[in-house]
Amino acid sequence: MRHKGKIAGEERRQLILRTLQEAGRPVTGGELGELTDVSRQVIVSDINLLKAKKEPIIATNQGYLYTAIPEATEEFERIIVCRHAPEQTEEELNILVDHGVTVKDVRVEHSVYGDVRASILVSNRQEVKAFIAQIQHAKAPYLLNLDDSGIHLHTISAPREEQLQQAQDALKIAGFLVE
């Protein structure tokens, strides 16, 4: 639903915040811009101002996501260390999501910038395929390319601890897990 006319700053940011909280899914900057009748660049500034106020918003490859998790949701999480060639990224992510795991992020250690982290948030093959397509369309390098060794970390989560272990075991068999 598009608003009629531009909305003043704080009112617009509150509308963006409510929209993200109620969406339950990532919302693109373009969608938020259309809703509030401002450019995507204004949305980026508004999101940064909301983040500065400690609102739990992250930018994903699918759009902006409000990340406050309902307290009733119990989720297990761990960090794993992987190494593989860039062209094996889709295979790695598919192994994880096929075990019911959500891949939250990827992190590498850069010699100049230190830890570099990017949100991925994929939990099924369709999301993995969309993520890989976005990387290819943008001709963007995978973060694992920033480290000469190809070593990178993922934060993974699942409803059950055994799903995490099974996914980790499958990565080990595939030769992707660093132990």
Image (cartoon, helix red, strand yellow):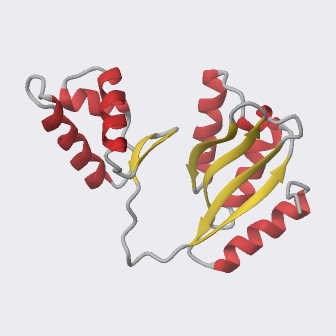
Residue placed furthest toward the left:
4
* Residue 152 as seen in the image, left or right of residue 117: right
The N terminus is located in which quarter? top left
* Residue in the picture at 73% in, 52% down: 153
Q: Residue 121: tell me if it is visible.
A: yes
- The picture places residue 97, in percent across and down from the top left corner, at 65, 59
Residue 105 sits above or below residue 111 on the image? below
Residue 88 sits above or below residue 81 on the image? above
Q: Quadrant of residue 137?
A: top right
- The picture places residue 85, in percent across and down from the top left corner, at 86, 39
* Residue in the picture at 27% in, 27% down: 33
* Residue 50 as seen in the image, left or right of residue 96: left
Q: Quadrant of residue 156?
A: bottom right
Q: Nearer the viewer, residue 17 or 49?
A: 49
Task: Report the label total.
Answer: 0
* Residue 81 as seen in the image, left or right of residue 65: right
The C terminus is located in which quarter? bottom right
- The picture places residue 174, in percent across and down from the top left corner, at 89, 57
* Residue in the picture at 73% in, 43% down: 108
Q: Quadrant of residue 175?
A: bottom right
Q: Residue 1: tell me if it is visible.
A: no
* Residue in the picture at 78% in, 33% down: 111
- The picture places residue 29, in percent across and down from the top left corner, at 36, 31
